[in-house]
Amino acid sequence: MNTPEVVVYTGAACPYCDRAKMLLERKGVPYQEIRVDRSPEDLTTMLERSGGRRSVPQIFIGGYHVGGFDDMSALNLEGKLDPLLAGEPL
């Protein structure tokens, strides 16, 4: 299976964004960080992709919208994050 692209939409001074990035880094997962506070276009894209969720981070693994850090952390605790990062469907 192909490793899915991981995209993390973040903002300035966001502790939950930092935690999300640290969790991915601990797992050795490359990710694309998109700072929505620097680009109105990226904010619009995040809102469209997330169904209107304005909080950051918003995390996408492949085509799956994980949600925020708490959502990703819950998946990790349930043992579902690693398979998702490996390209397996939930």
Image: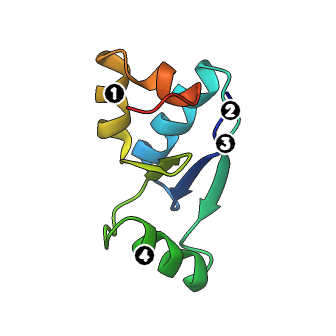
SS at circle 2: loop
Q: Are marks 4 and 1 in contact (CB under 8 Å)?
A: no
Question: Disc 2 marks which residue?
Answer: 3
Closest to the observer: 73 or 84?
84
Separation (CA) of disc 1 from disc 3: 17 Å
Question: Disc 4 marks which residue?
Answer: 48
Residue 58 x %, y %: 43, 55
Tell us which disc is closer to us: 3 or 4: 4
Check disc 2 and give the amino acid type.
Answer: Thr
Question: In the rendered structure, which disc, 3 or 4, sits on the residue that comes first in sequence?
Answer: 3
The residue depicted at 31 percent of the width and 73 percent of the height is 52
| Mark 3 closeness class: few <14, some 14–19, many ≥20 residues within 10 Å | some
Q: Quadrant of the C terminus?
A: top left
Check disc 1 and give the amino acid type.
Answer: Leu
Separation (CA) of disc 4 from disc 1: 23 Å
Would you place residue 53 above or below residue 87 in this image? below
Question: In the rendered structure, which disc, 4 or 1, sits on the residue that comes first in sequence?
Answer: 4
Question: Disc 3 marks which residue?
Answer: 31
